[in-house]
Image: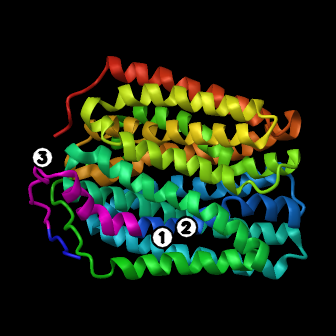
Amino acid sequence: MTSHKPTANSPPAMTSAGEQSVLQQLAPIVLAVFVSFMTIGIALPVLPLHVHGQLGMSTLMVGIVAGAQFAAALLTRAWAGALSDTRGSKRAVMTGFGIGIASALVYFLSLYWVDQPQLSVAVLIVGRVLLGCAESLIVTGALSWGVGLVGPQRAGKVMAWVGIAMYGAYAAGAPAGMAIYKTFGFSGIAAAGMLAPLLAMVMLLNVDAIAPGKLRRVPFYKVLGMVWLPGAGLALSSVGFGVITAFVSLLFATKQWGSPSLAFTAFGVGFIGARLLFGHLPDKIGGAKVALVCVLIEVLGQVFIWRAEAPLLAYLGAALTGFGYSLAFPGFGVEAVKRTPPQSRGAAMGAYVAFLDISLAVTGPLAGALANVAGISAVYLAGAACVGLASLVAVRLLASAPAEAS
């Protein structure tokens, strides 16, 4: 594969460059993100079963274990953005792979105390925290790397393709994780979680980095202020994703519907299908317009899961949630990029995705507490309400669209 050697002073990719050229530039990064995110994907349907079933913990603890990854990612976004902007996005991504390997080793360690559930869960949470740090570095670095390769005018495409890699890994990883768990138990999940980022690291060893910019960076807290409005839209729209990842396994177990893996696959198919068919729209017609339509589709998906009396309706709800959330992410993201200067793109990506971390870190425990009181299905009604609020953010963005930052 031909490698590219842009520098900090290189012009952005020419606007006449075709879609094929853009994808060729992004392909190594996208593929490596997909492989590394299999670590997260294979654990999605398994963690609730392991924590609630094997270790006997409450749904609240399931939410805490799920949310620990996203809380850690939130707390490391500023560091990930700074590392990407000052030491290079490749350095950030490769560091993330290394920490991902360490998190899988801690998963293994938690099994040593499986007969002491509280201690085992505490160690498992440490592994989840490390995985959150890894995810923060990989996503922030990959987005910054991609925008540096093809230019900020194609930021929506970068987010679309990196997102396809992430959520494609969730869709493929969920059934693979269930199969591994049934055959090898949680130790098999830990082993696969170690091998995936190791393979991704090898894949990017010979891909050239982009030199970090030399202009003075905007402080992270100021960047955070620039992107708070689209970030709020991302946070609210991410609740639908959060309640699926944390609780759909328990929903299926409670209703005795069998394996939940197809719900994750349905989400992933909807997500990837939307990006393949309509991923160009945020760059073409505006991020806020796309986000407004897509969050309403996501609301419909959450309502379907809430009202589901059979697994087929839950699958449809998961697919609609994935379809809507798919383009809400780059839709709000394009608005975030417009509000930040180019020398702080890494910080901008870190600050924007931090709102996803906030959402998922809070969603897990709060939804777990709600499930204890009102049942598992109630979390999807709450999810529909939160995602619905994101439409108000999209309307506000449409009324206050800025000129692109320079």
Give the magenta part as a residue range.
6-31
In this rendering, does residue 106 appear at all?
no
The answer to whether 219 appears left or right of 38 in the picture is: left
- Give residue 38's mark: 2
* As drawn, 314 above or below 20: above
- Asked whether residue 399 is drawn in magenta, I would say no
Q: Secondary structure at mark 1?
A: helix
Q: Amino acid at mark 2?
A: Met
Classify 10 Å Cα crowding around label 3: few (below 14), some (14-19), many (20 and above): few
Q: As drawn, which residue projects farthest toward the top?
A: 399
- Give residue 15's mark: 3
Gap between marks 2 and 1, in whole Å? 5 Å
Q: Which residue is mark 1?
A: 35
Q: Amino acid at mark 3?
A: Thr
Return the x and y of residue 105 as percentages of the image width and height.
64, 81
Classify 10 Å Cα crowding around label 2: few (below 14), some (14-19), many (20 and above): many
Q: Secondary structure at mark 2?
A: helix
Q: Would you identify the image quadrant in which residue 190 lies?
A: bottom right
Residue sitting at 41 percent across and 70 percent down? 32
